[in-house]
Image (cartoon, rainbow, N blue to C red):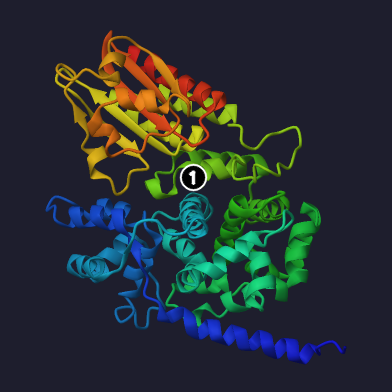
Amino acid sequence: MSKPSNAKISNSSESRLEIWLKKLPQNPLPINKAIARDVLKLLGDDSCDSPTLAKSIQKDPLLCLKLYHCTEKKLTGKQGDIQHLVHLIGLIGLDKIKQVITNSRKIAMPPDGFKEILSASLFAAHLASTLLNKKHNATSDRFFLPTLFFNSPLWLMWIAAPKTMSQGQTLASKKQQSYIALSVKKLGFKLPDLIEQSENFILLPTLTLDALAINPTKNVHFWAKAHHLSDEKLAHWFAQDKTARNVFYSIPSGIYLINQYVISVYLDWNGKHIQRYGRLLCRHLGIDEEELNNSVLDLAINTPLPSLFQGLLAPVNRVKGLHKDPSCPINPNLDARKIQPDMINAWREKISQSNNVDTALEITLNALTHGVGVEHCVIMEVDEHDIHTQTCYGFNDNPDIKNFHSDWHTEKNLFQQMIQKPCCISVSSNDLPKATAKMPKQFTQHCEIKPCGLLSIFHQKKPKALIYCDHNQWDNDKHHHFKAVGKALAQTLEHLK
């Protein structure tokens, strides 16, 4: 049987690409349900200012892009030059923002792969705000939106064909990033060929479009030299070729490298892409590998993210490598399911630096979700009247858990018993029926109790907090670190007035 000619393969690839280019703009952007609710609440508050509103809006990349599209007619002749999110808010006005949110389709829980890309996009934007601002001495947050929107073609692909995108991820071998396998085996064309045509199907800032136009498959020699040359030879090359120097150190190249580095952190199985883009990014920024790693880790720990992107989707867990496939760890001596003690220690140290009780409780929630990787967490405050929810994770659409309270004076249950003295309980699958029966009915009616840990915290010899965390695979390792985080909180509260 004769093999298909290269011309036929090329025509087939171009045909499939054309279908996608027509398909992508036809699907309206959905927005996150919980964040939309928070933004509407702020819009109804007369005391809310633009920076506060911007902090809430920027938690949803899709909402940011949808609002940016409202500026199309207002930016005629300005080439899409939005300086930052506060600028965008002022440009379109509060009434327009409210209208967009009200009329948009809401989603509570996108597919895991889609959440992965959205989380990576948000982390890359925060990273650019730190690293590119420092490199270019920028006083405003002008790189956040252009960097955030870099992966928007992938967002549109997830919206248009979620099944295809999910299948593409499962095709990835342990030597590839998911989207490399996707483009080769599922789409029928090279993904960069679609991405470099982004301006044909989506309105984006000029900086973003310039970054997306960087197609390394068509300029392999340039990027290979930038990666492999020694520092001395690289400096000599750039001294001889000013055009190459300007391209490599340009803002679009910085946006491109930061996003490729973060995507590698999220999706790279063996570290090959992380190493490559990390080296290129260090050279672009003029910093060494240690400074980059410290900046990335610090930002991963401290970046505030919506609950949708916490737990195993949190940047800190990806940076530390907890996203590896548990059945195929890279190092046979390292079980990827185990929690990294150094990360837990970093969170415990952060708890100890809290200057008030509320801050300590909030950081504890982050430590349990980002560090221990629990699926659900409820931190309940204990006062002289009752036990009530102070903060929680994993219950986006469950107002009953957020509003939970139990009168510990009159109701006799497990929670009431635990606030008599400091204690820590681990509930296995076998213990679930017995433990569930002892918990307050108002709690168990709205929370599907799984294998879990329960911990009571005291402050000045009085009960201050009760913590519930669960996970389908609650084991001794998880309970040990859960208890360690609780101990750090208890010790911190002892030193607070």
Q: Is residue 191 left or right of residue 479?
A: right
Task: Compare residues 147 and 405 and report the one nearer the observer.
Answer: 405
Q: Residue 296's quadrant in the figure?
A: top right
Question: What quarter of the picture does the C terminus occupy?
Answer: top left
Q: Give the vertical position of 56 relative to 148 (above or below).
A: above
Q: Secondary structure at mark 1?
A: loop
Question: What quarter of the picture does the N terminus occupy?
Answer: bottom right
Answer few, some or many: residues within 10 Å of disc 1's Cα (few below 14, many 20 plus, some between 14 and 19).
many
Amino acid type shown at disc 1: Ala
Q: Give the vertical position of 223 relative to 440 (above or below).
A: below
Residue 26: x %, y % from top left: 41, 81
Q: What residue does disc 1 label? A: 314
Q: Is residue 343 visible?
A: yes
Residue, x 50% and y 47% (percent of image)? Answer: 313
Q: Residue 399's quadrant in the figure?
A: top left
Residue 119: x %, y % from top left: 47, 53
Task: Compare residues 439 and 298 and report the one nearer the observer.
Answer: 439
